[in-house]
Amino acid sequence: MATKAGSAEVPQSADAEGLRRRDYLKVGAVAFAGVGGVVALAPLLVQMAPSADVLALSTTEVDISKVQPGQGIKVSWRKQPVFVRNLTPKEIAEANAVPMSQLRDPQSLAERTKPGKQNWLITLGVCTHLGCVPLGIGEGENRGPYGGYFCPCHGSMYDTAARIRQGPAPKNLQVPDYEFTSPTLVTIGAKGK
Amino acid sequence: MSFSWAKPYEPKHPLMRWIDERLPLPRLAYGAVGGGYPVPRNLNYWWNFGVLAGIFLTIQIITGIVLAMHFAATTGGAFNSVNQLIMRDVNAGWLLRYAHMNGASFFFIVTYIHIFRGLYYGSYKAPRELVWMLGLVIYLLMMATAFMGYVLPWGQMSYWGAQVITGFFSAFPLVGEPIRIWLLGGYAPDQAALTRFFSLHYLLPFVIAAVVILHIWALHIPGSSNPTGVDVKDEKDTLPFHPFYTAKDGWFAGAVLLVFAVVTFFAPNYLGHPDNNIPANALATPAHIVPEWYFWPFYAILRSFTVDFVLEAKLWGVLAMFGSILLLFFLPWLDRSPVRSGAYRPVFKRFFWLLAIDVVILGYVGGAPLNWWRTALGQVAAAYYFLHFLVILPLVSAFETPLPLPNSITESVLHGEEAEAAPAGSTPRGGTTAAAVVQ
Amino acid sequence: MRFILGFIGAVLAGVLLISMISNLATYVQNPPAPLASEEFHKEPKALHLASDGIFGRFDKQQLQRGFQVYSEVCSACHSLSLVSFRDLKGLGYSEAEIKKIASDWKTQVPSINPDTGEAATRKALPSDNFPAPFANEVAARAANNNALPPDLSLMTKAREGGAAYVYSLLTGFTDPNGYRNEHGKPLPAEAKPPQGLHFNPYFANLNIAMPPPLTSNGQVSYADGTKPTVDQMAKDVSAFLVWTAEPNLESRRAAGFAVVIFLLIGTILGYFAYHQVWADAKRKVRVTGALDPENQAKTRRAKAKQGVAG
């Protein structure tokens, strides 16, 4: 960046003090333009963030009135599979009987469900190992030795509370934010009370 | 480049030295736009418009790339992807779309001023003929890019503009119609045309950028011309590009961007046409099909030929329209005056202004609905355009007496001071100089 | 080569001359009769909205009234397919109100019966766009005497005159019998509306397929108690359509002010910096010989001494 005003032929101006003062205006103008350039980047970056129509689909309402105990349904939320399972009392007891020390990712069934609705287990249907969709939600699908879900890709096995018990997956199936807007309607993606 | 007194690149910062030793880009930049490129000291503001064209090309490429992240190139989805997704839902989408839309107009405005600068000051003359012709190639690419870009939103004007422009080709006998169908990939603009226009619209700006590099490279061999048209003689005639012209280009760019911002934020639809907010309908033609304003002069020339004479009127119109740009390639040989700058060519100057007014009239006629007197006006204006370049300029350049040129650029810059300092008759200027100082 | 080019120029000019003569001759011999649509078409009436001008802002109350007019009158035939229910937040409605507006909307959204897979409809959600009143163009034309009611989302951007045109059109239906233009000329018989069309001088072709949609005061009863005259309803729905065409209008102008002021300051700073950079360049060029001011001064003094006239 030139700090001298002109080319070799131009007589040098008087003192160092005068040069520095002159520089402030040039530096100021360039800095101002630089700030403008950075601010101009903002719309270019922000336009890549999810647009309003994508954000509007960030919640999905699910009607659970037809899901019987022992049954489960697979729904789509934010373009991903979600397992909504109605646990039987036997399955709840099995889940509660497991000591925390035996779990790779210790969580109780109570922590993974809503109070008063312990039978409703709502989890993402995405294996926490490398992202396959585990089996076990549909009728007749292989539920693995722990009676929950079984991932056929690399053999991760989940129990009745969808917690990882065996296999390479590091964590339990993720529980998304959801809330019961009525006894038969669940809104997945909404932060509840 | 070609000037012996150009400052050599001496990197002070160790990082710059490290890079330069391995890849001489810093040296290239220094010699092209830095302190190492001598430029005539007397350039006026008409010389700012080349850089401005480069700025708007950059704006178009950047806004275009981000718009392409959201645009859907399907006949069913294009209109909605522009008018719903981008304009309403994408964060800052409305800003990007309006900036791209008006950026195209501003790109043409600065380019037209840049071209007219070249016409007035004889920038197309030896040794800069290739600079001129590369510039015309850039202009042709710009027109193709703009035309295809306008089709993408798939509004009524997009569709019918595509119909009309591709319809030109069917004016050519025998090969015309097959070429038209080949261009469109169908019998009318449809999905095939839309997708290929999207692909080419994305590609061509980068081709433009490459030709711009050639254009600047070719310019930097002889260096920039200047308002007197007199060649650079020695160091006194020039200033290093940086900081003198970076400062001048910088502030003026701010002023032009200010105007651009006013239009983009406060009148974004002024230069456009309302009909493009109606989804394309192949079965209903708009009342008045017009292209965007920067094509209006050519549209006027096209529509001026209304009578079959040996050839069909439509074919005359198409040939004349393409011819009006192609003849510009011959300009260095049509205008053979040894004097470059219009400032020293009084007869040429008057015809130049006539041409400028003529082009404005052609633009007006091209954009307005046709009636009998506008058609007649367009015909006169179109005739003048061809006569100007093909008949008048050669004659004027052969017979005109130019004004005496200054001996050097420095002399012309100091004209004011030296005229007051020295008594009349003792100055070299006026009287004793011969006219031909160029080449 | 120059002669060839010159010849081409002369030929083109010649052909243009022939065209022009032919054009003028045609005009003189058969002067085109003025079209009824030119003589009787009226320019839009002036309309002043809160959103006009660079400082304009939307009047949300008016937008809500206009939305009410759209939902109760226009939505029977005209779709608003680029607008989503969630966009109504811009009118000042709450999330709960929007949910209700969506689910109460008289046209439902096409969907599939989850048990049988057959085509069905469902109530609209806030994330849906306004469902179109007709399934497709054929259905729309069948229900409207072969006319297609256009989508209204961009209407004020899609017509010359914008909101003023929409307002004038809605209030411009008049009886063609006895109608005279501003020069007192009566409407000729061939310009009168054929069966199924309605005379409206603000419409480009004078006769529009849409029957007057706003016919009586009180057609809509406004929730905020404003008097629902035909004029008021037309103004309100025009204002609403300005919003549907440009919901980002206010943020566009706000951002515009910030950018323009920034660029103004930047340009001024840049201008002064430019002058500073150039201050030494133009004047203090070191020149030698006859152009050196020192030598010129010497010459002047010498000449003055010798008494030479300057």
Image: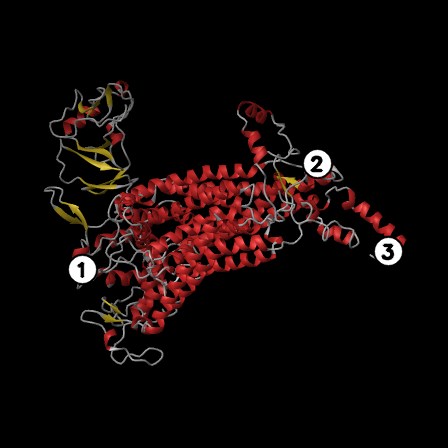
- Compared with residue A179, is residue B294 higher up or lower down, i.e. above or below? below
Asked whether the viewer can see residue A193, the reply is: no
Amino acid type of the residue tagged 1 in the rendering: Arg
- Disc number lying in front (1 or 2): 2
Q: Position of residue C102 (x, y in %)?
A: 24, 52
Amino acid type of the residue tagged 3 in the rendering: Val
Count of residue discs: 3
Q: Earlier in the sequence, mark 3 or mark 1?
A: 1
Q: Which label is found at residue C308?
A: 3
Left or right position of C279 against B314: right
Residue at the (22%, 50%) spot, across then down: C124
Left or right position of A81 against B401: left
Helix, strand or loop under label 1: helix
- Compared with residue C156, is residue C30 higher up or lower down, i.e. above or below? below
Callout 3 touching callout 1 (CB < 8 Å): no
Residue at the (35%, 46%) spot, across then down: B148
Residue placed under numbered mark 1 in the picture: C141
